[in-house]
Image (cartoon, rainbow, N blue to C red):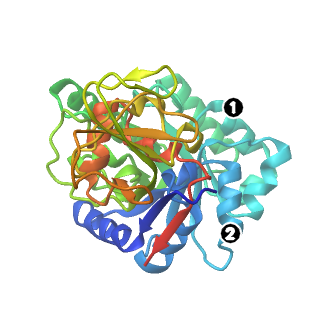
Amino acid sequence: MRLGANLDIDLKLLKSNVQALTVLASNSDILFMVKANGYGHGMVPVTRFTLEECGVRNYGVATLFEGLKLRKAIPEHSFDIYVFSENHLSSQYAEQYSHNALIPVLSSLSELDLFLSEQVFSRVPLVLKFNTGMNRLGLPINEDEFDLIVTKLKNKGRREIFHLMTHFGRSFETLAEPTQITQEQMKSFEEIRQRFLQAGFSIIFTSTSNSGAIERGIGTGLSHVRPGLMLYGPSALSTNSTRPNWKGHCISSLKVQVLRRMSVKKNTPIGYGGTLTPRDGTICVLAIGYGDGFSTKLQNTTLYHLPGQPTFFGRINMDMAQLFYAGSGSSIPNEGDVLEIWGHDASHVLSISQQSGIIPYEIYCALGERIPRKYTL
């Protein structure tokens, strides 16, 4: 932990974002993605708050051990936890799912075989995720393998699908070709659903929409939507796209202390590599670096929302970074002052992302444990 940097998280803004989402997807329940430590915001506090204050009852994690951590941290509440990516369905871990009420999302034939072969999974809801075109994880949709899946399920007496899913690969893009691809994925998903119904299966829940699709109104008529980034604030649409619907607030604000301020002349070498200052100005050394998950790619990023519009200058170090202010004046902070690297206006993070080429997901998720998280209600 360090004293010179904090990630301040306003849970009232999270509640506001949940309320705004219910307007966009009024007929769908929320399956809130809290993997990667709640996109860097704290998986357990974010889950507990949305459970108790926002009425969310479904959560998504990436790994079995994220699911176990979440279940053990909030034992007093009943809610569904879906494990999406790293399932470990072997005999060694099978009982962890049943005993801790975790729901594996099955996305391969081998996972399905393991799920059907272990008696302990007979008490676990069946969730199937199909590959409709993203070509990452997902069960096959060609006719022969689909028929094989149906046969396997019927042989084990499984005629109920708890949740049927797919995942969009390009829903964050709004240009003509990506839009068509997303619509084709949606069409394929509906065909899969119909094939199961025709084969005599019942399907309780369905979902396709990640944040980008929700913003664009694709798949929002299904039983669930699966928001991630948008509930933490920024739009999930690519930076060259419009933002027609989402007005979320960034729930976090990264605040960093100035360790040192010094006036510099043009061509003064700064830090590792001795990057030369382009003109007379002021350097402020900040208490944050790549050891805190603050990427070296943020070099040359300008903080347009701050007075003086300073730029990260020279190499970002393991423990420090430098801001360059052109000239001098009252807009330049003093030693001990605290700067807001980004605030609750989502445009701050989106500006940093566009300049650096680092997507907001990575900016958030990269922040390490050394930066304290402080929560306000």
**Could you say where residue 347 lies in the image, as x and y percent from the top left?**
24, 49
**Could you say where residue 81 lies in the image, as x and y percent from the top left?**
59, 60
Q: Amino acid at mark 1?
A: Ser
Q: Which mark is residue 232?
A: none
Residue 236 in view in this figure: no
What residue sits right under mark 1 in the picture? Answer: 110
Q: Which residue sits at x=26%, y=41%?
A: 351
| Closer to the camera in the image, 205 or 252 | 252
What residue sits right under mark 2 in the picture? Answer: 73
Q: Quadrant of the C terminus?
A: bottom left
Give above or below for 277 relative to 159.
above
Q: Which residue sits at x=48%, y=35%?
A: 295
| Closer to the camera in the image, 76 or 37 | 37
Residue 250 in view in this figure: yes
Tell me if 232 is positioned left or right of 118 in this view.
left
| Quadrant in the rendering for residue 322 | top left
Q: Amino acid at mark 2?
A: Ala
Q: Which residue sits at x=27%, y=53%?
A: 346
| Closer to the camera in the image, 76 or 209 | 76
Q: Which residue sits at x=53%, y=34%?
A: 317
**Could you say where residue 311 lies in the image, as x and y percent from the top left?**
30, 37
